[in-house]
Amino acid sequence: MPRERPAAAGPVEVRGARLADEFDRAADRYDLLTRLNPGYLRALSTAAGELVSRLRRRGGDGPLVLWDLGCGSGLSTRALVDAAGEDARIVGVDASAGMLGRAEVKSWPDGVAFVQAFAQDLPEVAREHGHRDADGVFAAYLLRNVPEGQRDEVVAAIRDQVRPGGWIALQDYHVKDRRVATAVWSAVCWGVVMPLSAVVRGNPAIYRYLWRSVVDNDSTTQLQARLERAGFTDITWHTGTGWQRGILHTVLARRPDADAA
């Protein structure tokens, strides 16, 4: 089916535009480098499965309607398709044209579409594409790429695009206020990731940014507070395995039913 690639709705945030350009330059080698990260794909699959499992418990056998925010090259989208089934309706959103180009050349069921936009533009994208009141939202490695002053706004926008009773799953690296986790993260980035990016002719700038963005990212306590301010409930956390223990975190949260407001 034709892939949807409109321009980002609303004003372009300068830092975001520059960051999208860096992801464009990294796109050709991005999947290769993630495959070299032990546990990366497994963690995406686990989080997507947990999200779908919570949605299925609500009953109903119809196709799920899902957002995949910060979908990148489509690795998280594939995890959602595998978990939710090929009849699911999934819209992947990303600001990087290069990353979306990598996603679009892969084989997808008819219910999968991609839109180029910033996470901050989600309300406009939802109105334009008729994908409001989705069952759930998956966002892997997204919020640390959003300016800190806009993160509450994005979390609120995510809440508004999920039906009452729907669920969200957010996955990212959180090391702030964790001295050991910060040290391990820095060692992995400077000792493994950046040398590998040079070997495979990736974009070293994006991986230097990756290191800094994680160090500066919200702590789990800060993100918990953002979710609570947005009105999410039933918030649960778990961490990764192996070298990612205490570094990679997945949080699931529910938008309350309308009659519980």
Image (cartoon, rainbow, N blue to C red):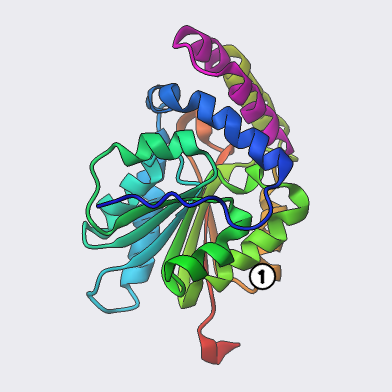
The residue at which mark 1 appears reads as 230
Residue 175, image x and y in percent? 67, 38
- 181, above or below 158, in the image: above
The amino acid sitting under disc 1 is Ala
- Location of residue 130 by image quarter: bottom left
Query: What residue is shown at x 71% (from left), y 33% (from top)?
Result: 215
Residue 163, image x and y in percent? 47, 77
Q: Nearer the viewer, residue 185 or 76?
A: 76
- Location of residue 31 by image quarter: top left
Residue that extends furthest to the top in the rendered view of this protein: 199
* Residue 215 forms part of the magenta stretch: yes
Query: What residue is shown at x 67% (from left), y 68% (from top)?
Result: 228
Quarter of the image with the C terminus in it: bottom right
- 19, above or below 161, in the image: above
Residue 126, image x and y in percent? 50, 67
Residue 120, image x and y in percent? 63, 56
Residue that extends furthest to the right in the rendered view of this protein: 149
Tell me the chief SS of the magenta region: helix
Q: Give the range drawn in magenta.
A: 192-216
Asked if residue 232 can be seen in this view, the reply is: yes
Q: Which of 139 and 181 is in front in this view?
A: 139
Residue that extends furthest to the bottom in the rendered view of this protein: 259
Determine the secondary structure under disc 1: loop
Query: What residue is shown at x 68% (from left), y 24% (from top)?
Result: 183
Q: How crowded is mark 1: few (under 14 residues within 10 Å), some or many (20 or more)?
A: some
Asked if residue 249 can be seen in this view, the reply is: no
Q: In this view, does 259 lie to the left or right of 52?
A: right
Query: What residue is shown at x 73% (from left), y 47% (from top)?
Result: 147
* Residue 71 forms part of the magenta stretch: no
